[in-house]
Amino acid sequence: MTKSVDADIFAYAVALGDDGLIHGQRLAEWVSRAPTLEEELAIANVALDHIGRARLFYARALEAGDDGRSEDDLAYRRDADAFTNLTIFELPRGDFAVAVARQFLTDAFNVPFLEALAGSRDPGLAAIAEKAIKESTYHLRRSRDWVLRLGDGTAESRARMQQALDTTWAHCGELFEPFAAEERLRAGGVAVDRAALEGPWRATVDTTLRDATLTVPNTPPAAYRGRSGRHTPHLEPLLVDMQVLQSAYPGQHW
Amino acid sequence: MSEPMPLFEVFIRSKRGLDHRHVGSLHAEDAQQALEYARDTYTRRSEGISIWVVRSSDIVASQESDSASFYDPQDDKPYRHATFYKVPDDVSNL
């Protein structure tokens, strides 16, 4: 592999790792706040799946671009503008319907995305996808189930589910926008053509929302672009919370 | 939540060839959700390969007051117990 390909793989893997880490952290915020004990355990499992995925992507990134940093450095010692996660993951925890909307809209993307990534020419990325796809298949089963329950539930649950979809929808466009390094890797068969996934994603979303008696939102896209570090104001407080231990006691470990 | 969700009993088969065993219970809206919660609550450390869930209210249980007529008559019939057989060393799950 040439040096520039390695630099691209570093950026790509860090971006995918950031998606997992920030989503995992938002989900972890539900611990002690979930509607039932059973749901809390289930959400915590999903959170750990995403954080586990982040670690694997960070490890692959550091193989490609070993600059002396560790996984912890990437997670705990970067500021908001250095994170490249998609902004849908950093949106505030919100009510339970927001957690469901975010989970469903991104699971419906992750399943075809990981299926495609499993065919990557990079064996490291392909192996991560192979493992993650089983997790995401289960996540989608769960989140789809909740969209149906809330959408086709009471008047209040339906209104909240619709509201949650309408607000998160503005950040879904980013799911299908590749960044420069990703474009180059795609040409080399390493990265996934995420723009091509909009069709299959829309099909899953349309069917589910129809079955849930919900309306497909037409919220205009937000101006934020997480991949270029243009984050919402919500990422910074999340990082302050997540990084508090390493800020107070630098280098501390278990 | 207006009324509490129904209770389900969870049974897990830990490996092929063994029986499903009762591992606990949980609350869920319906059987489908109970199955998913059972997966997340009771199999997160690879405890199982198959899950059964059943509404607790569907279980018919013997009563304490029946115990004299149900169980006491067996106490003096040791010939029904298979205690005279030696279990071969290779048989681990009997």
Image: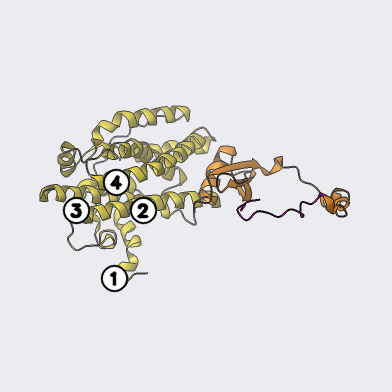
Residue A198: quarter of image: top left
Q: Label 2: state its secondary structure.
A: helix
Confirm whether circles 3 and 4 share one chain.
yes
| Cα–Cα gap, marks 2 and 1 | 21 Å
Residue B89 pos. (x, y %): 62, 56
Identity, as a three-letter code, of the amino acid under mark 2? Gly
Identity, as a three-letter code, of the amino acid under mark 4? Thr
Q: Between disc 2 and disc 1, whose residue precedes?
A: 2
Q: In this structure image, what is the colour of chain A?
A: yellow
Identify the subunit bearing mark 2. A
Residue A232 pos. (x, y %): 28, 49
Q: Between disc 3 and disc 2, whose residue precedes?
A: 2
| Cα–Cα gap, marks 3 and 4 | 25 Å
Label annotation for residue A251:
1
Confirm whether circles 4 and 1 share one chain.
yes
Identify the subunit bearing mark 3. A
Q: Nearer the viewer, mark 3 or mark 2?
A: 3
Chain letter matching colour orange: B
Q: Nearer the viewer, mark 2 or mark 1?
A: 2
Residues at circles 4 and 1 in contact by the CB criterion of under 8 Å: no
| Cα–Cα gap, marks 2 and 4 | 20 Å
Q: Between disc 3 and disc 4, whose residue precedes?
A: 3
Circle 1 Cα neighbour tier, 10 Å, few/some/many (<14 / 14–19 / ≥20): few
The foreground one among A166 and A251 is A251
Identify the subunit bearing mark 1. A
Q: Quadrant of the C terminus of chain A?
A: bottom left
Residue B15 pos. (x, y %): 55, 47
Residue holding disc 2: A52
Residue holding disc 4: A87
- Residue at the location (25% across, 59% down)? A74
Q: Nearer the viewer, mark 3 or mark 1?
A: 3
Q: Label 4: state its secondary structure.
A: helix
